[in-house]
Structure formats: structure tokens, C-alpha cells
Image (spheres, grey):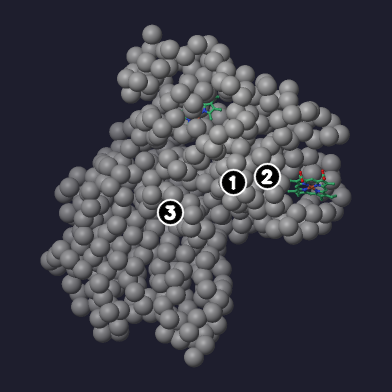
Amino acid sequence: MLSRRDVIIAACALGSLTVRPGRAHATPEFLEKAIQDITKGAPVKDGKVRLTIPALAENGQSVYTTVAVESPMTKADHVRAIHILSEKNPIAHLLSWHLGPRAGIAKVSTNIRLAASQQVTALAEMSDGTFWRDRRDIVVTVAACIDGG
Amino acid sequence: MKDLVKSLALIPILALPPSSASADPLPSGTTFQSTAIRAQQADEGANPGMLWVEAGAKLWGRTEGSAGKSCAACHGPAEQSMKGVAFRYPAVEPTTGHLLNLETRINLCRTKNQKAAPLAYESGELLGLAAFAARQSLGLPIGVRIDGAAAPFYEQGKAFFYRRRGQLNLSCAQCHVDNAGRKLRADTISHGLGNGYPTYRLEWQTVGSLHRRFRACLFGVRAVQYDFGAPDYLDLELYLASRAEGIAIETPAIRP
Amino acid sequence: MDISPARISVPTEAKKGDIIAIKTLFRHPMETGYRVDRYGKPIPRRIVKRFSVTYAGDVVFAMDFTQGVAANPFIAFHAVAVETGEIVFVWEDDQGKIVTERRTLTVAR
């Protein structure tokens, strides 16, 4: 008789496209370095930024992600850029959005890839040179029957 | 999970249920998805499957083949001519007696009416045209014919659905009837319906046909996979459509 | 498919000062460069590098990508309606392929 493991393993056999093994994964220091590269050493404060991602993603290939930053978005006081960073992807600095007063509000969405369960960081760079962040944990699972179609 | 294994073991080889001529429609596969996926599916501006629908809209107006005709040249605006077509498919084509789904029906128009080469089954072009045509039936309930000329195809599709196969010796029904609503790893097993196809699957990172989904499930149980558009898959698609009676078309759906 | 890979949702009309929501989808594999094909051969990286949006003389929004962005990238962002004009959307991938789309926004006072 089939064991529960057999059912799951066989039903979930990896498809023809597999990830190449042995590549380096980002370490927390790697994440710190990526943040340093953006901030050039300026301090990062918690607040002003709101990162919205699901607590659980059924597939790390595409995770719906929204970042909103509190800002009047005027010439004098606006969000210059928003960055999204990962601690477990091969590349820590996933993307940057460049904004300005002509955006009206600082709220952007996209779909990101996440290689594993982890904490995701959203980092906002203001026109006065200050940096603000939000961090969220996410559990990434893999779909049961990976292609093979 | 224990329950899953237990019930899988208890299923007799061919357990045919009483004919399904009553009851409420089954829940669509979409109802088993997360709120994030459901929201993205419902938002035309965010649903990546709409890229294929839009490509299909453009192909609809493009002249192809030696007959020098576009789809639109014969059918006019798809918003009218294709509305209410997808929910009747698969259907028997009366002159040949063949069972056709939307993809193979479109390819028949390619070869017979446009005098052009058929499109490869899983090509972006055919997926685009099929998604665009099906999209015109968005929200309309599925209702296929399973009597008359369709009856033998329906019976074969039903038998396929209940037959155990593969190294795991599992039938479609053992997962999609007996264990619908239960978890298999990260997925919740749905009733295995085709009302959202062609569908954007995150795992595929593209739109794929219902037959691609069949191939994935057959791969999962380590069974023989048939070619895209194979008669066995068309029969199966008809049986699935009969199970989906009354469920709205949701093409292009999003699945993990 | 030799069909524009872009799909843009943007209003055609707005009042001056309105903040409009813009959504874009772009058909692109965003191939990470980490995967191998069924014969074990690495699939070369191919990703969109940059997306930018120009309207009434200014870049109002831009994005830098890595392979950490999902395939067929979706982006939702905002812009202030300042004057009637063209909004120009440009996607550029790492093979130098550039796709440009234009939409006209009519702005009433």
C-alpha cells in the first residue's frame, strides 16, 4: 500500500525544469551590504513605509507586493525611491522604483520572486536624504504538482 | 492527510456515481485560491492572462492564409459572435462527427476557412485566440451537450476520469471527487474543472491549456501523458465540462 | 508572437490635479539564468532591465529590475494629471530590445 510520503513525493515530482544546484544564497550580511550600498551608511528608521505581502504564498514565482509610503509628495518633500530587498534570494536587492512629486502618491505594486520563506524588506529613500523601512515575514510553499506537463 | 491515503486505498477500481442531473453546481477552482490570487484574477489590469487575451484580440483581426481572410472577416466583432460559444464546448462538429474543443475548433477554421497552417496546440497564438474567444463568455454558465452524437465521447471521458492509472494507480476521481477540499502539500485539491482555461499558472509563468493541466496531473501520478489535443483529452474535457454544468466561465483564471 | 507584449490600463480623461492609477503588464519570460533545460543545459538569463514612464516633459515613474521580479511583470503606480498629453511607456530588456507604447491623457481644467 502507498504511504503518505509516496503519494506526495510521486505526485509532486519535480518537472523538467529544475533549479541548478550549488548556487550561493544571500546571507543576512549580504542583505546588510545591499542596504549599505543604497544608504551609503545613512541610518535606517522603522516607520512611514507599509509593505503588504501575503503571509503565505502558494508559489514563490510570483508574490503580489505593494509598498505605500507616507509622504505629501510635494517638490520639497517626497519619496525619491523605494527598494525591495530579500534575505534568502540569490540577489538581495530585488528592484527599485523611482518616484517624485509628479507621482502624486507613493504607492506601487508588482509581483516579486521569493526563493524561500523569509523576511522581506521595503526601504524608502526620501527627498531629505532619510531612509525608512518596513519588514514582513512570508511563508513560501511550492505548488503540489510541479508541471511535468 | 491520513484521510487522503485511507480513502485512496478504499476506492474500488471503477466507482461510477449516480448520474449528475440535479444538485447545485460544484464550486469553481477559483474558490480554493488565496485572496491575493483571487484579487489578481479579478483585476483585468493585474491578471497576466489578459496579455494573451489581448494578443488574441489582435490576431482576431489579422489576415492569414491563402483565403486572405481574418477571423473577423467572417465572424465580425468577437464581442457578439463569440459570446456564448465557449460554454457549449467541447461539441460535436456535425459534418465530420468529431468532438472539438475551442482550440481544435479554431484550428479547423485556420485550415478549412483561412486555408492556413494549423497553429501549434500550446503556441502563444492558439492560446491567445482561445483565451480571447472564451473571454467573450466571461460569467456565463457552462452547459455542454452530452446526449446524441456527444454521448459516446462523454462515456469515454467519464471512464477515463474514473480509471486508475500510473505508477501511483490513482484515478482523477480519487483526488478530484473523493478528496476535493483536502490539502495536497500547499494546494487544496479542487473539483478539477476547466472553467478557467486557458489559465495563467504561476508555476508555468505563462498561460497554458487545460490539456497542459491534464499532462501535469498525469505526470503527478506517473502515468502516460497524451499529446496536446489527443482524442482522449477531448473526451475528458467534455466530461469535465459536464461536471462543471452551471459554473461561470472565468478565463483567464490564475492558479499557483 | 509578433504582437505588442504590453497591456496598459490608464484613464483617457482626468481633471487637472487628479491622481490617476496606472497599471501595466508586459509579456516577458524574466528568465533568471538559474534554470537548466531538460538536457541539463543552463537557460541563459533574459530579463527586463528598466521600465520608465514619461509624461508632460518629466519621467514620472521608473523601475530597475533584477531576476527577482516575476515573469510577465505587472506594475501599478500613480501620476498627477497636469496637462493634456502623451504618456510614453518604455520597457528595455538586457538584450537591448526596446518596446515603446503611448497613450493620450486628456486633462480638463
Q: Are marks 1 and 2 on the same chain?
A: yes
Asked if residue B61 lies left or right of residue A93, the reply is: right
Instruction: Give the residue drawn at x 70%, y 52%.
Output: B83
Q: Nearer the viewer, residue B120 or A37?
A: B120
Instruction: Give the residue drawn at x 57%, y 57%.
Output: C5
Identify the residue position indicated by label 3 in the image: B39
- Mark 1 or mark 2: whose residue is earlier in sequence: 2
Q: Chain of mark 1?
A: B
Instruction: Give the residue drawn at x 42%, y 17%.
Output: B8
Q: Secondary structure at mark 1?
A: loop
Q: Are marks 3 and 1 in contact (CB under 8 Å)?
A: no
- Structural distance between the alpha carbons of marks 1 and 2: 8 Å
Q: Are marks 1 and 2 in contact (CB under 8 Å)?
A: yes
- Mark 3 or mark 1: whose residue is earlier in sequence: 3
Q: Chain of mark 2?
A: B
Q: Secondary structure at mark 2?
A: helix
Can residue B57 be seen here? yes
Identify the residue position indicated by label 1 in the image: B249
On screen, B109 above or below B219? below
Disc number placed over residue B86 in the picture, else none:
2
Instruction: Give the residue drawn at x 30%, y 33%.
Output: A22
On screen, C65 above or below C77? above
The x, y position of residue C16, in whole percent, is 46, 86
Tell me which amino acid carries mark 1.
Ile
The quadrant holding residue A117 is top left
The quadrant holding residue B240 is top right
